Amino acid sequence: MTCGCVVRFYFLSAECDAGYGTGEKHCGDCDYTELNSIHNWRQTLSSFYLCTLYDDYGNTFTSIIQMYKCIIFFSKHQISYSKCYTIFSHLNQKESKATTKIDNLEILEYVVKSKYESNHKLNRVLKLTGTSKLVYYKHAEDYIENLDIVLENERGRIRKEML
């Protein structure tokens, strides 16, 4: 459940306090002091933020967008000899045939989970957003449908693990 605060982000987000940027709302229920002390924290949540991500099979990626597009590409073209295809097969628990389609949202959930499990600093930034509603600003090629919703779900998963 989210509080009344709204926080927007994308890869070119300007540096300003949480809840006070364009299209944002600060309801007073959230303390963003620690979050605001992190330089460019909004950019770290975006899909283009450069960080090392690891999948379950030893592949390394440099951003959410790279990992996401790689998996989408190899699953769309049904290339079974790629290491990326292994992820595609792994995600689809029902069948692992090359002809099986997988939902892009499921791939995005896997990629986001990989990002925040691989990097404790980014994990901390996501937790510091509190219970705010996250809004992913739609900006050209950076935009991935439902990233804000998936991030809110990942934040909830991280909080449950902490308990």
Image (tube, rainbow, N blue to C red):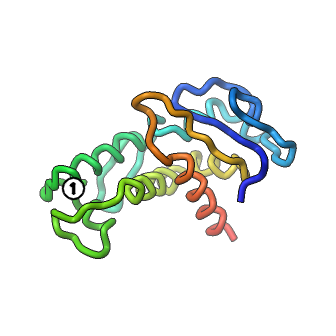
Horizontal side, residue 90 vs residue 132: left or right:
left
Which quadrant does the C terminus fall into? bottom right
The spot of residue 33 in percent (x, y) is: 80, 39
Horizontal side, residue 131 vs residue 10: left or right:
right
What is the secondary structure assignment of the residue under circle 1?
Answer: helix
- Which one is nearer the viewer's eye here, 93 or 64? 93
Q: Residue at x 44, y 41 (%)?
A: 144
The spot of residue 128 in percent (x, y) is: 70, 48
Q: Residue at x 59, y 35 (%)?
A: 9
Horizontal side, residue 60 vs residue 151: left or right:
left
- Which one is nearer the viewer's eye here, 87 or 59? 87
The spot of residue 88 in percent (x, y) is: 27, 60
Total labels: the figure holds 1
Q: Residue at x 31, y 73 (%)?
A: 93
Q: Where does label 1 land, which residue? A: 83
Q: Note whether 118 is above or below 13 in the view shown.
A: below
Query: Label 1: how many residues lie within 10 Å, few (<14), some (14-19) or many (20+)?
Result: some
Horizontal side, residue 73 vs residue 119: left or right:
left
Q: Note whether 58 is above or below 122 in the view shown.
A: below
Residue pushed farthest bottom? Answer: 94
Q: What amino acid type is highlighted by mark number 1?
A: Lys
Which quadrant does the N terminus fall into? bottom right
Residue 95, image quadrant = bottom left
Q: Residue at x 37, y 56 (%)?
A: 107
